[in-house]
Image (spheres, rainbow, N blue to C red):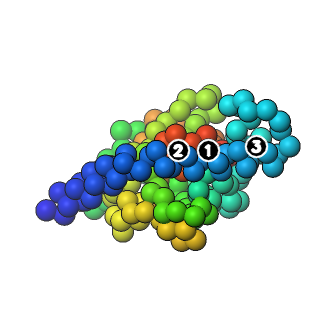
Amino acid sequence: MRKTTTLALLATGLIALGCGSGAADKASDSGDSKASSSSGDEGGAKAEEKPAKTAKIGQPARDGKFEFTVKSSKCGVAKIGSDMLGQKAQGQFCLVTLNVKNIGKEAQMFDGSSQKAYAADGTEYSADSGAAIYANKNAETFLNDINPGNQVTGVVVFDIPKNVKLTKLELHDSMFSGGVDVALS
């Protein structure tokens, strides 16, 4: 029963995200142009939308309407959740504890599935939204809109091979934003 409710909440959140993605795209475009103009770069090329500086764990990093602060990263986790309700990793889970603050002027939904992680060789890994349900005790942490000035803290989960070490994250305020890099090592 609880698993069904959680899945229903997840589906509702994803549908709501799809409905609001056009507004998020518009807002992230304005946020990205501020970031590129403040760095002193001129021109409008896509490569110039991302700031050259990479944030580190504990440092705030902005993309669009969100300011992200990675609090910690823990890899090598084999299972998330309880014995009755949980999920086993295909390889290993990497749990990234993240604070997300809405710095915009409108509510914005955080979408864990828009976040990416990278290994040293450039291999890209997507977030595991199903496992994140079990990693976050409050399932509503990343499924509700975050109002301006508010912030939430939760865990984004990546299922990666056992022999891989993540070196950076690419965090996005929406699936259409340019993203911001955060070094994990």
Residue closest to the eye, 84 or 130: 130
Q: Is residue 87 above or below residue 136?
A: above
User: Which disc number belongs to residue 25?
Assistant: 2
Quick one: which residue is furthest to the bottom in this view?
150
Left or right relative to 108: residue 40 = right
Check contact, mark 1 vs mark 2: CB within 8 A: yes
Residue closest to the eye, 164 or 14: 14
Which residue is painted at 36% across and 65% down in the image?
Answer: 140
Q: Position of residue 185 (x, y in %)?
A: 68, 47
Q: Position of residue 64 (x, y in %)?
A: 61, 51
Do we see residue 107 in this rendering? yes
Q: Assess disc 3: are there few (<14), some (14-19) or many (≥20) residues with their C-alpha within 10 Å of its C-alpha.
A: many
Q: Position of residue 50 (x, y in %)?
A: 70, 40
Give the residue number, with chain letter if any, for mark 3: 36
User: Which disc number belongs to residue 29?
Assistant: 1
Q: Earlier in the sequence, mark 1 or mark 3?
A: 1
Left or right relative to 177: residue 23 = left
Residue type (three-letter) at the residue carrying disc 1: Asp
Q: Assess disc 1: are there few (<14), some (14-19) or many (≥20) residues with their C-alpha within 10 Å of its C-alpha.
A: some
Between the C-alphas of marks 2 and 3, the distance is 16 Å
Q: Position of residue 12 (x, y in %)?
A: 28, 54
**Regarding mark 2 in the picture, which secondary structure is present there?**
helix
Do we see residue 71 in this rendering? no
Which residue is painted at 31% across and 49% down in the image?
Answer: 15
User: Which disc number belongs to residue 122?
Assistant: none
**Regarding mark 3 in the picture, which secondary structure is present there?**
helix
